[in-house]
Image: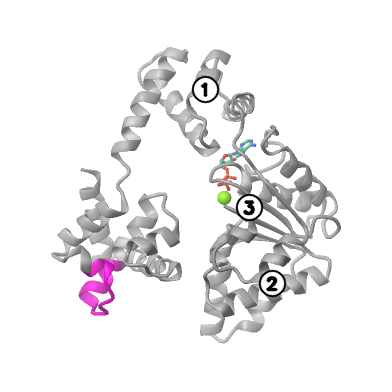
Amino acid sequence: KDLLNPKYTFDNFIVGEGNKMAHAAALAVAEGPGRDYNPLFFFGGVGLGKTHLMQAIGHEVLRTNPNARVKYVTSETFTNDFINAIRTNTTDQFHKDYRTVDMLLVDDIQFIGGNKQSTQEEFFHTFNALYNNNKHIVLTSDRDASQIPELEDRLVSRFKQGLSTDITPPDLETRIAILRNKANVNGLQIPDDTLSYIAGQIDSNIRELEGALTSVQAYAVMNQEDLTPNTAAKALRSYRSNAAKSAPSIADIQNTVAQYFNLEVADLKGKKRVRSIVVPRQIAMYLSREVTESSLPKIGQEFGGKDHTTVLHAHEKIADLIQENGEVSRDVESIKKLLQK
Ligand code: ADP
Ligand code: MG
């Protein structure tokens, strides 16, 4: 779990106006970890390359020193590991796992905010233990540290004591370069005018840009058409209408789950602890996380204002039950089918 993605290297990272500060800082840290910019804090919107850049640092450190201990986790994993360590009386091992590394990369640190005080406190001590030993810490967040809700002041000030740098959306030139690189990596020959066309159509985030490229390619193969801008236009039109169709909202999920189990949506949003309601509620939260792009806090909010750790717990619980492949796994499959209609 939480290993580095082999594709997220500096080689595959295209530098543009919106990320060049972040990129320069990342390179500096990769070349001299434990020195400047500790912690290094990247923030910015979804799909702009925060995870990629953070992992590129890890790859580079490991390339120059294969014995280095680089640990990559999301803040959710940190939280879960900590909760599990307490539950199983293994906090010593937990401290060892987190405090004896050479570099700690924590992705999406915004989710540490709003956590029980003990988790934030634990992160504070982890941070200090590493920092005081000149070990490097790299963090990403969807917003500036001071904007993270319910984040303890002492963590905000730790996060800001190194270098904070934001990543902003790529301009057209950068988007074209990213597409060209992606096409090369995948061994695709795509004419420049087609790449420009796609880059002109998708200006929100890079993950979507990649999705668009893949679907244009698939469309061209399926319909045996050349990869012209005209083909790209048709492909993107069908890609968009499919995306609109196949993306149910949290409310859709709640309605479908309630109907399936013969319950009221209010039961799913409520607090009743009987099993006949708890499991459907957890299934609805699980599906909200799996099939929508919503954040954990947003999902919690849509379920009657629950904490995001409740959503996380529900997700894990249902994932476990699905593994056991019993009734719950069949229910989830059936509900997914209903959602596709
Ligand atoms: P974030 O963590 O900010 O949500 P990611 O790092 O997951 O975004 O990036 C989303 C996708 O876009 C990934 O597949 C990543 O490889 C790609 N990507 C992002 N920025 C760049 C870039 N500058 N050059 C090439 N690919 C990029
Ligand atoms: Mg990310």
Query: How far from the left and from the top, in percent, is residue 223?
Result: 35, 18
User: Three-letter amino acid code at disc 2?
Assistant: Arg
**Other residues around mark 1 within 10 Å, as few (<14) / some (14–19) / many (≥20):** some
The part of the chain drawn in magenta is 267-281
Q: CA distance from mark 2 to mark 1?
A: 43 Å
Q: CA distance from mark 2 to mark 3?
A: 29 Å
Earlier-in-chain disc, 3 versus 1: 3
Q: Is residue 278 or residue 2 the one in the foreground?
A: 278
Query: How far from the left and from the top, in percent, is residue 82?
Result: 57, 76
Q: Is residue 251 left or right of residue 289?
A: left
Query: How far from the left and from the top, in percent, is residue 153?
Result: 66, 70
Q: Main secondary structure of the magenta part?
A: helix
Q: How many marks?
A: 3
Query: How far from the left and from the top, in percent, is residue 159?
Result: 70, 62
Q: Quadrant of the N terminus?
A: bottom right
Q: Is residue 309 or residue 148 the one in the foreground?
A: 148
Q: Which residue is mark 3?
A: 4
Of helix, strand and loop, which one carries label 1?
A: helix
Of helix, strand and loop, which one carries label 2?
A: helix
Q: CA distance from mark 3 to mark 1?
A: 31 Å
Indicate whether 23 appears above or below 272. above
Q: Which residue is mark 2?
A: 154
Q: Judge depth for marks 2 and 1 and give the one in front.
A: 2
Earlier-in-chain disc, 2 versus 1: 2
Q: Judge depth for marks 2 and 3 and give the one in front.
A: 2
Instruction: Look at the numbered disc 3 and say if its residue's Cβ is closer than 8 Å to ligand 1.
Output: no
**Other residues around mark 2 within 10 Å, as few (<14) / some (14–19) / many (≥20):** few
User: Three-letter amino acid code at disc 1?
Assistant: Gly
Q: Is residue 265 or residue 105 the one in the foreground?
A: 265
Q: Is residue 317 or residue 298 the one in the foreground?
A: 298
User: Three-letter amino acid code at disc 3?
Assistant: Leu
